[in-house]
């Protein structure tokens, strides 16, 4: 199945007191290039996240971002370190008792600012890891679905142009006998004009040589075969972008040869139309995984 390399997807969920959000964006690239941005507290997810991205996507530039913030539930999970606060209050009372004059009063907020006075409820790291990575899988599935949907559109465009190219090749092949006969007649008429003594044997030799030089049947056959290969490749399940790109290079080479060997305006026009179709397909294939 053809997949586009351009897509965007995301997934969001509340997990253990935090709101987690994955954003995944991909664009075309020769190889798989993953740019992963994670909050510092979740750097430990990077190896497994990269592995899962590589399993879902084989080619393209992939930007993957994880963001998170505490929910109200997560904020409520903060608790007071009673033992430490009690020690702080006892120490404050002791200092005040030793003083010969009243000390400045302090409020509860200042006590809470003391390092360790507030503690966060321990989170099950294993469960957190599992659920955050499952959320990544969900975002990746959505991105792949988007790439496949766009791939269907690309497949239709490439198939349509391949079929049109086959039609042009068939029309050019059908005209070959007429073209060669026209060349033969033209040369014979020219020779009659410039020579009263026509050497028919030499003429036949020159005609054979010229016919071989102008014969584009092989180029048309190869163009037709490459177009068939493109159509067959579109049905493959694995990524085929590079294979299609190679086939387009070969098709373009044959179309150029056809143009250089063309002996009439119609064949030249057909070769130009083929090159236009090939270039249109090339533009589409640049975005195929």
Image (cartoon, rainbow, N blue to C red):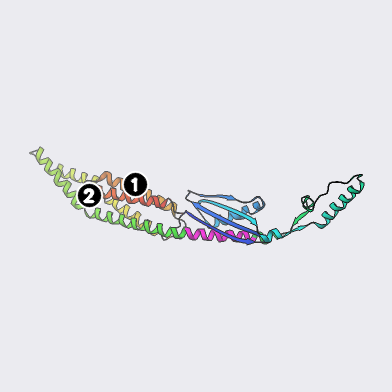
Mark 1–mark 2 contact, CB under 8 Å? no
Mark carried by residue 231: none
Q: Quadrant of the N terminus?
A: bottom left
Residue beneath the point at 14% across and 44% down: 186
Magenta: main secondary structure equals helix
Q: Which residue is mark 1?
A: 253
Q: Which element carries disc 2, helix, strand or loop?
A: helix
Camera-side residue: 180 or 47?
47
Left or right: 201 with respect to 155?
A: left
Residue 221 location, x and y as percent?
30, 53
Q: Which residue is mark 2?
A: 266
Mark 2 surroundings: few (<14), some (14-19) or many (≥20) residues within 10 A: some
Q: Nearer the viewer, mark 1 or mark 2?
A: 2
> Is residue 261 within the magenta segment?
no
Name which quarter of the figure residue 73 lies in: bottom right
In this picture, is 150 found above or below 250?
Answer: below
Q: Which element carries disc 1, helix, strand or loop?
A: helix
State the separation of the CA atoms marked 1 and 2. Answer: 19 Å
- Magenta residues span 130-146
């Amino acid at each position: 199945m053809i997949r586009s390399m351009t897509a965007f997807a995301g997934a969001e969920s509340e997990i253990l007191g935090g709101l987690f959000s994955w954003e995944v964006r991909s664009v075309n690239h020769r190889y798989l290039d993953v740019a992963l941005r994670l909050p510092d507290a979740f750097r430990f997810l990077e190896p497994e996240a990269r592995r899962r991205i590589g399993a879902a996507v084989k080619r393209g530039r992939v930007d993957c971002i994880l963001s998170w913030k505490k929910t109200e539930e997560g904020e409520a999970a903060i608790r007071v370190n009673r033992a430490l606060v009690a020690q702080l209050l006892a120490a404050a009372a002791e200092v005040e008792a030793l003083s010969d004059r009243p000390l400045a009063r302090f409020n509860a907020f200042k006590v809470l600012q003391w390092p360790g006075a507030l503690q966060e409820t321990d989170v099950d790291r294993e469960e957190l890891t599992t659920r955050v990575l499952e959320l990544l899988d969900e975002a990746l599935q959505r991105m792949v679905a988007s790439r496949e949907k766009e791939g269907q559109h690309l497949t239709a465009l490439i198939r349509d142009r391949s079929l049109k190219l086959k039609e042009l090749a068939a029309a050019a092949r059908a005209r070959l006998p007429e073209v060669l006969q026209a060349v033969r007649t033209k040369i014979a008429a020219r020779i009659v004009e410039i020579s009263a003594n026509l050497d028919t044997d030499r003429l036949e030799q020159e005609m054979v040589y010229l016919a071989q030089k102008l014969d584009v049947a092989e180029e048309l056959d190869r163009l037709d075969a490459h177009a068939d290969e493109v159509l067959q490749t579109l049905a493959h399940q694995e990524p085929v972008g590079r294979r299609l790109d190679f086939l387009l290079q070969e098709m373009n080479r044959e179309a150029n040869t056809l143009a250089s060997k063309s002996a009439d305006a119609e064949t030249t026009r057909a070769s130009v139309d083929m090159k236009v179709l090939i270039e249109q397909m090339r533009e589409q294939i640049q975005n195929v995984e």
